[in-house]
Image (cartoon, rainbow, N blue to C red):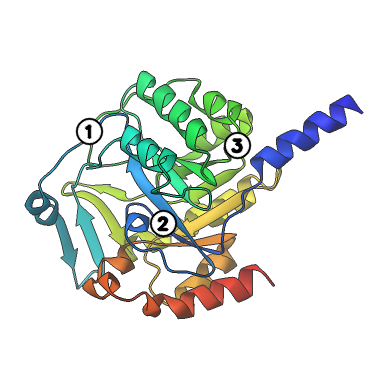
Amino acid sequence: MVILSGVKQVLEKMELKLEPLIIAAPFGNYVQPPGAVTATLGTFTAAARSGRVWRIIKTVRYYRRLGAWVNKIGLRNPGIDWLVQRVQSGRVDVSNKIVSIHGFEPADWTLLLERIESIKPAAVELNMSCPNVGEIHVPTDLFQQAVAGATPVIVKLPPVRYEAMVEGAIGAGIRAFHCCNTLPVPAGGLSGKPLKPLSLRCLRDMRSRWPEPKLTLVGGGGVTSVADVDEYIEAGADHVSVGTMTMHPRYLWTTKPLDPLILRAKSQLRG
């Protein structure tokens, strides 16, 4: 009975209570439509990474012919303590949101996970690959550290060479993954339509390679239409993530263009 009780507690801790449609970081900082949507805040680092607005604008490029965005923003953010202060003061509610984090050194990851436990978001997303921040050093026991907390964990995978990472995460007890992060290119991180086939392939590979234990998969990359939502669900996604679609200036005053995607995800992923 004690063993069964312990297994039940572990399963309850891993359970993700997320809406069918997810707004990916950093777009979830700004676009948070009501309804069947979970926003992802971040990506937050241990220390603030400042940057002038003009520099951020300058390092983001849209290629209309490809339907692609390339960015070299470099995780500009006010740091995890900024978020903690706002949560603890009641200015920000993360109980229904994902918080994305990224560490450059092992000590960064430890601090970030400690801060996450103090604010209790719906889930923490470990951003495991960011092509435009240079070399990172991941602690060998990162996944064990992450599952030791009470917050459900999602690992955001790179679009290529993710197999060993998945094996390590599953071995540590992680059961949720996001396919996929931006693709490394010489100019920075590539997202949008060119990422879509890689993310779909990752989802199908995850479902076939790891049929057990049951995984929860978030699929995203190039989602701009109901048809894209359907493709991700067919490939095995339990949740669909929208990102660079929300870069359009119209999202400063309306989120109505997301309504068809929200309704589709809600109807398909909730039966």
How busy is the neighbourhood of tag 3: few (under 14 within 10 Å), some, or many (20 plus)? many
**Of label 3 and label 1, which has the lower sequence position?**
1
Kindly identify the amino acid type of the residue bearing the numbered disc 1: Gly
Residue pointed to by mark 2:
198
Kindly identify the amino acid type of the residue bearing the numbered disc 2: Leu
**Is any part of residue 108 visible from this angle?**
yes
Q: Quadrant of the C terminus?
A: bottom right
Q: Which mark is residue 134?
A: 1
* Image quarter of residue 70: bottom left
Which marked residue is nearer to the observer: mark 3 or mark 2?
Answer: 3
How busy is the neighbourhood of tag 2: few (under 14 within 10 Å), some, or many (20 plus)? some
Image point 60% across, 36% down: which residue?
Answer: 174
Q: Is residue 129 left or right of residue 4?
A: left
Kindly identify the amino acid type of the residue bearing the numbered disc 3: Ile
Image point 36% across, 52% down: which residue?
Answer: 25
Q: Secondary structure at mark 2?
A: helix
Given contact means CB atoms under 8 Å apart, are the residues at marks 2 and 1 in contact? no
Q: Secondary structure at mark 1?
A: loop
Residue pointed to by mark 3:
174
Image point 51% across, 43% down: which residue?
Answer: 121
